[in-house]
Amino acid sequence: MFAPAATARIWLCTQATDMRKSFTGLTALVKNQLGQNPLSGHYFVFVNLRKTQMKILYFEPSGYCLWSQRLEQGQYRVQPTTSGQRELTRTDLQLILAGIEVQKSRQFKRYQYPVQPHSGTISP
């Protein structure tokens, strides 16, 4: 199962994407279609026209990473938006991967401990 970093933002491209695209093609989509910086460390989610394949592009200090999944049955439940993109929470992404339609589900407010990047030092 895919688990994104807690501090990263997740952007869903709601327009259909050609799944033949790889690192270079998806990086160009992030820049030109989403207007985002692919080197930001954020996660960029792409789904094909039939909504049976998903790719997630992100950048780590050592280079680009690409996670891919093809469904053998069913579809990802993502709805198009007028802007062509939508920000997701980690929970939203996990629900989409599990086959649950995010727009129809309702999540009640819960306390979330603020996550801070690890500095590598221990304070007294």
Image (spheres, grey):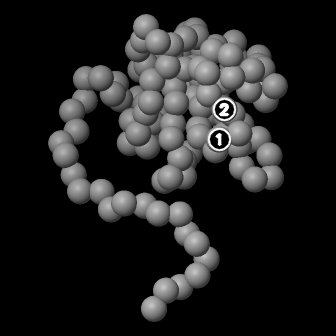
Residue 15 picture quarter: top right
For label 2, the crowd category at 10 Å Cα-Cα, with few meaning under 14, some 14 to 19 and many 20 or more, is few
Amino acid type of the residue tagged 1 in the rendering: Ser
The residue drawn where x is 51% and y is 36% is 10
Q: Quadrant of the C terminus?
A: bottom left
Helix, strand or loop at label 2? It is loop
Helix, strand or loop at label 1? It is helix
> In the image, 106: left or right of 57?
left
The residue drawn where x is 66% and y is 24% is 30
Q: Position of residue 112 (x, y in %)?
A: 30, 57
Return the mark for residue 67: none
Q: Position of residue 34 (x, y in %)?
A: 59, 20
Return the mark for residue 37: 2
For label 1, the crowd category at 10 Å Cα-Cα, with few meaning under 14, some 14 to 19 and many 20 or more, is few
> In the image, 67: left or right of 50?
right
> Where 120 falls versus 123 (above or below)?
above
Q: Position of residue 91 (x, y in %)?
A: 38, 42
Q: Position of residue 43 (x, y in %)?
A: 59, 38
Q: In this figure, which residue is indicated by the disc labeled 1? A: 40
> Where 85 falls versus 61 (above or below)?
above
Q: Give the spatial CA distance, label 2 vs label 1.
A: 6 Å
Viewer can see residue 96: yes
Frontmost residue, 123 versus 49:
123
Frontmost residue, 85 versus 1:
85
Dot 2 and dot 1 residues touching (CB under 8 Å): yes
> Where 102 falls versus 74 (above or below)?
below
> In the image, 91: left or right of 12?
left
> Where 9 falls versus 103 (above or below)?
below
Viewer can see residue 52: no
The residue drawn where x is 36% and y is 60% is 114
Amino acid type of the residue tagged 2 in the rendering: Asn
Q: Residue reaching furthest left?
A: 108
